[in-house]
Image (spheres, coloured by chain):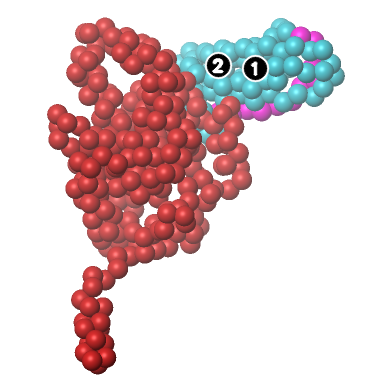
Chain colours: A red, B cyan
Amino acid sequence: MNFWRAIVLAALVATAPAPLAGEIPPDARRSGYSFMGPDTRAMQDDDTSSPGMLFVLDGETLWTKKAGSADKACADCHGDARSSMKGVAARYPAFDKALARPVTLDQRINLCRANHQQAAPLPYESRDILALSAFVAHQSRGVAITAGDDPQLKPFIEQGRNLFMQREGQLNLACTNCHDDNFEKRLAGSPITQAQPTGYPLYRLEWQTLGSLERRLRSCMTGVRAQAYDYGAPELVALELYLMARARGMPMETPAVRP
Amino acid sequence: MAALINVPAKAKRGDIIEIRTLTSHIMETGFRHTMDGALVPRDIITSFTCRYNGAEIFRADLFPAIAANPYLSFFTVAKESGKFEFEWIGDNGYSSTASASITVE
């Protein structure tokens, strides 16, 4: 009897799916902030020395500036961003019913421009789109991330997770190989972080400007010598959604500063 | 352009106070090339001045090796209530100003 039970147990263990590369338990998650040196932390902590705040100021101006043939400003519909935009960025990328897929905050801003302001879309990574999304996301600073809670997003989170686990490029590395398995080690002298997207759009000292999560993802892809997806590609949005869902509950830091 | 200024709102007469300034600027070095090989022309801030009630108390020359969005911090003695005026001057006729007030007791 015991013999058969042992065989059944062994068979069960053998057929169970191999655990995917060590995903980080919720209480072991750390923001990129905790990997930074004291100088860079001080820069982020003081709003008058954080260059990201310059973009937030620009975004505040754009918020009340009329645009497009509808001659409407963001504020004409959304009012005071301090109350209307609080917590919004924490749940992006969010599901868009009309498009039947998730959209990022930048894409939402451009959808708003197209549908309500009748204005031309702002190009990805242009100063204005970064300033507006930084201003909107800044209203959620300190708010816990809730992205991915919508059940309609489930297949897209799964797609993003698969992409995160998928080896790619000439170096044949998946995101998970560094960011789940080897965080806290170093890559060419720089700390490898957990890839928790808590502070986007963020000011990267290497870029000397603010940049989106998509820019960060694309530079990682170029780093493993893979062909990076285009800005706004469904794969990038899915990855962004997976990362935000993976950081669920962590507080937003926008605009963060990173080396 | 946007600027962030940090001057203490209040100070005691004779106190040494720190002034921190951060301004928006791309600080294009003039040494970079585009993908087509064309030189990106230099576009930097070349000079910064701070006046305290009209009198110049700090001046700095800036050069191409200085990072984008230059941050400058310096100290002065709080002598009297009044106004600090900041001015950034740069290439292509760039000029930007900001100001901050202080109450000295």
Q: Where the C terminus of chain B falls, by quadrant?
A: top right
| Whole-percent x, y for residue B2 in the image | 50, 18
* Amino acid carrying mark 2 in the image: Ile
Foreground residue among B9 and A192: B9
- At label 2, counting other C-alpha atoms closer than 10 Å, the crowd grade (few under 14, some 14-19, many 20 or more) is some
Residue B48 percent coordinates (x, y): 61, 20
Q: Is residue A63 left or right of residue B71?
A: left
- Residue A116 lies, in percent from the top left, at 22, 15
Residue sitting nearer the eye, B47 or B53: B53
Q: Nearer the viewer, residue A25 or A181?
A: A25
Residue B73 colored magenta? yes
Mark 1 lies on a secondary structure that is strand
The answer for which chain carries disc 1 is B
Q: In the image, which residues are magenta?
A: B70-81
Q: Secondary structure at mark 2?
A: strand
Give the Cα distance between marks 2 and 1.
9 Å
Residue corresponding to mark 2 = B89
Q: Measured along the vertical axis of the image, is residue A138 above or below residue A175? A: above
The answer as to whether the residues below labels 2 and 1 share one chain is yes
Tag 2 near tag 1, CB within 8 Å: yes
The residue sitting at 46% across, 40% down in the picture is A251
Q: Does residue B43 appear in the picture of this structure?
A: no
Residue A50 % position (x, y) = 54, 31
Q: Which residue is mark 1?
A: B49
Tell me which corner region of the image, top left, top right, bottom left or bottom right, holds residue A241.
top left
**To which chain does the residue with label 2 belong?**
B
- Give the residue furthest to the front: A1
* Point 51% across, 45% down: residue: A33
